[in-house]
Image (cartoon, rainbow, N blue to C red):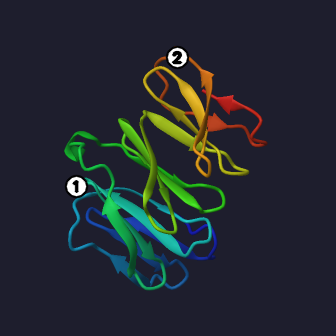
Amino acid sequence: VWSPYYENVLAVGQVFGVKIFNSGTGECFVDFTPVIGGRLKAFCWSPCGRQITAVFDNGQSYAFNTSSGVVDHNCIFAPDIEYSNFDEYEMSYSSDGSFVAICNWQEVVIFDSRSFEPIFRHNAGTFAWSKFGNKIAIFDDNDVFVINPETLDESLLFTDVRDIRRIAWSADDRYLII
């Protein structure tokens, strides 16, 4: 995955970690493999490019510095879930980088990206951050709702919907595609 900020910087997921390369020289300048980790399930860049957050199949989640590989924060994503049952995870930062959400198709957890403390958790199948502002749309078993992570205000948008794999905001954030 290319850095959103730095030109010629590429992060590559490995079985047990993430390597960051200078694509011009081929040099690997960060090799992040946590001591307490499992198999890498997903990772994403922060919008500023200074941090990558990675989640592993044992539930450990790490935010590490992309220049040094030093861990800034770590936590257990959701301690009461059996992680080996999930092959797909999705995760991404809010557009301003204040929050990061991780979902394993059973639960979504929103973290404050400064402290990496969980601020919201909910049963969920998928989510999508708005492109402007900090809104996150979440699909659970039957409903689609929007949350403002700063206030935790919720707005129910659709009820009794089924079989949704992905949701997305329109380019101008006016519409939600389900």
Per the image, the residue denoted by label 1 is: 58
Question: Element at badge 1?
Answer: loop
Apparent side of residue 104 relative to residue 36 in the rendered image (left or right): right
Nearest to the observer: residue 172 or residue 8: 172
Q: Which residue is drawn at 52% across and 54% down?
A: 92
Where is residue 146? Give x, y as percent.
61, 35
Label ID, residue 155: none
In the rendered image, which quarter contains the C terminus? top right
Per the image, the residue denoted by label 2 is: 161
Where is residue 43? Give x, y as percent.
42, 59
Picture quadrant where residue 174 is located: top right
The residue type indicated by label 1 comes to Asn
Apparent side of residue 57 relative to residue 153 in the rendered image (left or right): left
Q: Residue at x 79, y 42 (%)?
A: 172
Q: How many marks?
A: 2
Apparent side of residue 62 relative to residue 171 in the rendered image (left or right): left
Nearest to the observer: residue 137 or residue 10: 137
Q: Which residue is drawn at 33% across and 63% down?
A: 75
Picture quadrant where residue 104 is located: top left
Where is residue 47? Give x, y as percent.
61, 65
